[in-house]
Amino acid sequence: MRPTQSPDEIDIEFERYGDGQPLLLLHGGMAPTEYWEPVISALEAYGAVVPQRPGFGTCLDSPAETSAEEVLDRESRYVQALIDAVDGDPILFGHSYGALTAIETATEMSVESVIAYEPAVLPADYRADADLADRMASLIQNGEREKAVKRYIEQVLHPNGIENLDAWLAEWPVWPDCVDLAEEVVRMNRSVERYRLPNRLDVEAPTLVLAGTDGPEFLRRSARNVHDALPHSRFVEFDGVSHSGPAAAPARITAEVDAFLQK
């Protein structure tokens, strides 16, 4: 990771790949920056910029007092600082919470384009009963940090169930180190649970909203809702692709992204 400081003195940390038009790749909850490697290799004509989200890096610890209400604003300001630190007209490509951050950032700054894979937005009826943050916080308070993170993984990454979670975790690159991020994930989930999608998102940039049929049903619904709220948006749904679409099906996803960006 390349640490630097933006013109407005926000410390940022990122890797840059190539010299093409900057393509900022914003990861979701607990996903490692390595998540984007298949995308980087498929979109090598662009200059991929892979930041470490605040609170998720080795030198970007999130202040304990950061509230749920401040998390999304903090993330958006971080991406704005990153945009100021790179040359060229940026393209924002976000996954999950990174997709929500990309959209929010584009309401504040001019960007070339936005790609959002299953933004972390809850439909109103689902949000009314959402309690993942509370359940995780309760487990952490009881000293069950690992169990708290597993609840997040089960609900978000494997909403349709998984036969052997421990076997899956044994192959997951960020396990068990990600258990250290438990409090940050709680704050992120509270932020998602309290976010209200406006009727219209003030994003002037052309936006590609993506979803997969094998991910959480509520995120598929939300992706369509986000698409409807954007003034210049295209929606594409991939059959048989999960919430981990950019990493799990990079050829299909990046082909659609490249076609969108070339128009």
Image: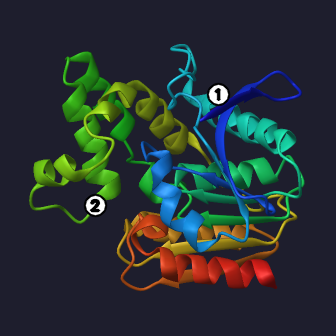
Q: Where is residue 12 in the image (x, y as percent from the top left)?
A: 70, 30
Residue extending furthest front?
Answer: 18
Which amino acid, mark 1?
Glu
- Mark 2 highlights which residue? 159
**137 or 261, nearer to the observer:** 261
What residue appears at the point 58 percent right and 63 percent down from the top-left corner? Answer: 40
Q: What element carries label 2?
A: loop
In the image, is 138 to the left or to the right of 23? left
- Mark 1 highlights which residue? 70
Which amino acid, mark 2?
Pro
Q: Is mark 1 on a helix, strand or loop?
A: helix
Q: In this view, does 241 lie above or below 139?
A: below
**205 or 33, nearer to the observer:** 33
Which of marks 2 and 1 precedes in the sequence?
1
Proximity of marks 1 and 2: CB atoms separated by less than 8 Å: no
What residue appears at the point 82 percent right and 57 percent down from the top-left corner? Answer: 90
Q: Is residue 169 above or below residue 114?
A: above
Which quadrant is home to the C terminus? bottom right
Q: Where is residue 198 in the image (x, y as percent from the top left)?
A: 71, 55
Q: Position of residue 254 (x, y in %)?
A: 58, 76
Bin the neighbour count of mark 2 within 10 Å (Cα to Cα): few under 14, some 14-19, many 20 and up: some
Q: Position of residue 196 (x, y in %)?
A: 62, 49
Which quadrant is home to the N terminus? top right
Mark linked to residue 167: none
Query: In which quarter of the view is residue 243 placed?
Result: bottom left
Q: In this view, does 45 lie above or below 7?
A: below
| Residue 224 in view | no
Q: Whole-Å distance between the Cαs marked 1 and 2?
A: 27 Å
What residue appears at the point 62 percent right and 82 percent down from the top-left corner? Answer: 256
Bin the neighbour count of mark 1 within 10 Å (Cα to Cα): few under 14, some 14-19, many 20 and up: few
In the image, is 229 to the left or to the right of 119? right
| Residue 32 in view | yes
